Structure formats: structure tokens, C-alpha cells
Image (cartoon, grey):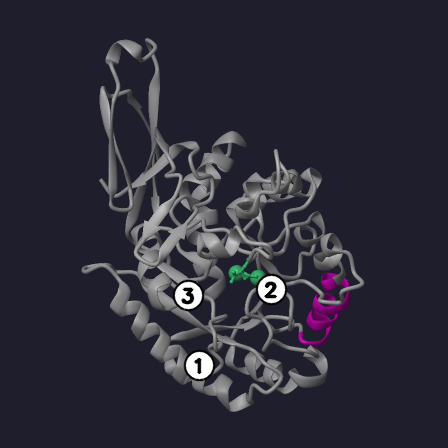
Amino acid sequence: MIKTLVSPCSVVVGFGSQKLKLDRSCKKVKPGAVRMELTISQPDDWHLHLRDGDLLQAVVPHSASHFRRAIVMPNLKPPVTSTAAAITYRESIMKALPIESSFDPLMTLYLTDKTHTDEIKLARESGVVYAVKLYPAGATTNSQDGVTDLFGKCLPVLEEMVKQNMPLLVHGEVTDPSIDVFDREKIFIETVLQPLIQRLPQLKVVMEHITTMDAVNFVESCKEVTPQHLLLNRNALFQGGLQPHNYCLPVLKREIHREAIVKAVTSGSKKFFLGTDSAPHERRRKESSCGCAGIYSAPVALSLYAKVFDEAGALDKLEAFTSFNGPDFYGLPRNSSKITLKKAPWKVPEVLSFSFGEIIPMFAGETLQWQPSFE
Ligand SMILES: NC(=O)N[C@@H](CC(=O)O)C(=O)O
Ligand SMILES: [Zn+2]
Ligand SMILES: [Zn+2]
């Protein structure tokens, strides 16, 4: 539902624990200016890194304040390779949640060369594990224990996943160092994903954090889309100097790819859903001689998705992308709770400070137009 309201004299915008009151003189508002409000079913985040320890405590409130559920990535150190570990990890997330939060973490298992078919059965029986995650070994952060040979080592497990109707979530990049880093997603589709789907057509596969028109055009799987791959192209890595906070994997691509992703997502196709890939790293680990891959988007993601759909003139398609296509794919109920997005400018903090260090959020210091609230 889209409502237009006459601009108020003041609005309160919130950001985590910070609230900022914008006193805007009515005189400054142009006659006839309107402010928009959009109420949608509460979104879920189908790709989220919550980490553990201090970082978990710091970041979980940001996701919990906007999203009702999230698929939680298992690339901890050590990785979450068993249902027992997933249950323990889920408990630590629940403990870190703000009181009265109804956030529901949906857990995943980290696939390795050694994962046993019994583990898939246990995962299904547990009721807390919703997917299995494929990290090609060496492809991304904490993927060292990932899969070295999917067809050679994991076929029985993949067949069990078909039986258990357990989706496979894929970091879709080849790891061959001789392949250009900007081509790794395209080559993965051709050499791994396409053969996988031919071999196991009933396997439910999600291509995560897509970055190319090749992924957009790969119709056989559903796809998650991050805010950064909708809003930034690879120039953002080098704008006025090296920009470590825009570095993630798969790496940002050319503008033609970004445009293809925006077009697909705002077209209303049910194959695309929200997955922020919010991946916090401490500032010192990003601003380093060998900086970590990952963009921390949880606090700004909804504002950014709204920006993309607004600029494409497709706000009427936002809700399906944020709140319907994901649960429909997973066979879960859509959320009955609602969230309101108000068009009112707010500034993203330059830095988020915690006792252990700092995190730089995506679009730090920039002014955004859409602000989620439950009021
Ligand atoms: N996206 C990233 O750049 N990093 C993620 C891992 C991943 O999703 O590939 C992380 O865990 O930091
Ligand atoms: Zn990934
Ligand atoms: Zn990720």
C-alpha cells in the first residue's frame, strides 16, 4: 500500500539506538510537496552473516529491527558443519537478540567434502536448519573448509538433499586462480551450476548475491540480490582512491551487469528475492594491506532496496521482492507483521563504534531517502 502524506514539520528518524530529530520548517517545504509512506509485509533476509562473539552482539539488533527472519550463513571459524553446531549457534543468536524481538534465525549447514548423508537427515529433522551452503574451497571469506570437488565428493549428499527437499545455497564462483576474477561467476554457471541442475533437476538451488547478466539470464535457479550489486558498479572500488568498504565477493562488476540486475529485480519476476549478504568485518580488517571481502549493509539495506525500486518507478514491486518471493521459494508462510517505509531524509552514520572496535556501514555518511519504521 502506498500512501502520500502532506510533509510534516518534523519527523523522527531512527538508526539503531540513535534517533535524530529533523526539525524542518514548514516554510521550507515547497507548496504541494508530498511525503510518501509505504507499508509492506515485514521482509526477511535470505542471506545474512551474523558472525559470533562480540561481532554477533553488535550486529544482530540491526537485522532484527527490520527483518522478521534471516537465513544465517555458516562460515564461522570453525564452520557450522553439523546440525548440533547449528543448534548451538542458533542459541547464541537468540541470547544476543534484544528483549521482545521476534526475529527468527533460520540456520544453514556448511557443506564440506566430508559431509555425510545422515547429517542432511538430521538437519531436516531438527526443524532449525533450512538449507545447505556450498562454498567452493577458497572462493570467499572462511571458505577454506569448503568443497573441492562437488561432483566427485558430494553427489550422495546432494541426492539426499533432493529427498529431503533441502535447498542448496551457492556462492557461485570458480576458484581457479587462472580465471579472471571478474569472470568467475559466469564460468561457474557454465561449468558447475548448469551441469549440477542437469544432473539433479529436482534439487532446489539458490544462486546467491548475483553480480552479472549471465546470472540474471540463468533461469533454472532462484537468485538473491544484494543492495551493493543493485547500486554500485566496479568504479565504486576505485572512486578517488581504493575503497575497501565497497569490496565484497563476488566483486562488483561493470555497469551493464548492474543495469541488468536492476531491470530483472524491478520487473516483478518471482525468481529474485532479497538477500543482503550483510557481512560485517571490523574496520581495521577492511582498511588493511590485505582487506577482507564483505560489506556491512544490515542497517541500511531496506532503505537501499527502496531507493532502487523508487528510482526505477517500481515501488509497487518492492514488497514481492522483499517479503513474498523468498518465503514462497522456501515453502514458508509470508509474514503477517508489517513495516512502514517513510520517505524522509536521514544520514547514515560515518562509523558504528563498539567496545571491541568499529564497523563502517554501507553508504556511510550519505543521506538516504527511505526510512523503515514500525510506527
Ligand atoms: N560477501 C563477502 O564478500 N563476504 C562474505 C562471504 C560471502 O558471502 O561470500 C563474508 O562472510 O564476509
Ligand atoms: Zn558468498
Ligand atoms: Zn555471504
- Mark 3 or 1, nearer chain start: 3
- Say which amino acid is labelled 2: Thr
Residue at point 32%, 57% (across, down): 58
Q: Residues within 10 Å of mark 3 (few under 14, many from 20)?
A: many
Residue at point 62%, 44% (across, down): 261
In reply to whether residue 194 is colored magenta, the answer given is yes
Q: Which residues are magenta?
A: 188-200
Residue located beneath label 1 in the image: 124
- Mark 1 or 2, nearer chain start: 1
In reply to whether residue 157 is colored magenta, the answer given is no
Q: Are marks 2 and 3 in contact (CB under 8 Å)?
A: no
- Mark 2 or 3, nearer chain start: 3
Which residue appears farthest toward the left when viewing the image? Answer: 99
- Say which amino acid is labelled 3: Arg
Query: In the picture, residue 365 is in which quadrant?
Result: top left
The residue lying toward the viewer, choosing from 231 and 236, is: 236
Mark 2: C-beta under 8 Å from nearest atom of ligand 1:
yes
Q: Is residue 37 visible in the rendered structure shown here?
A: yes
Which numbered mark, 3 or 1, is in the foreground of this view?
A: 3
Q: Are marks 1 and 2 in contact (CB under 8 Å)?
A: no
Q: Is residue 68 visible in the rendered structure shown here?
A: no
Residue located beneath label 2 in the image: 140
Task: Report how far apart the C-alphas of labels 3 and 1 lie in the structure.
Answer: 23 Å
Q: Is residue 372 above or below residue 130?
A: above
Residue located beneath label 3 in the image: 51
Residue at point 64%, 39% (across, down): 238
Query: Measured from the top left, where is residue 59 in percent x and y?
Result: 35, 56
Horizontal arrangement in the rendering, residue 236 relative to residue 79 (left or right): right
Q: Is residue 175 above or below residue 162?
A: above
- Say which amino acid is labelled 1: Arg
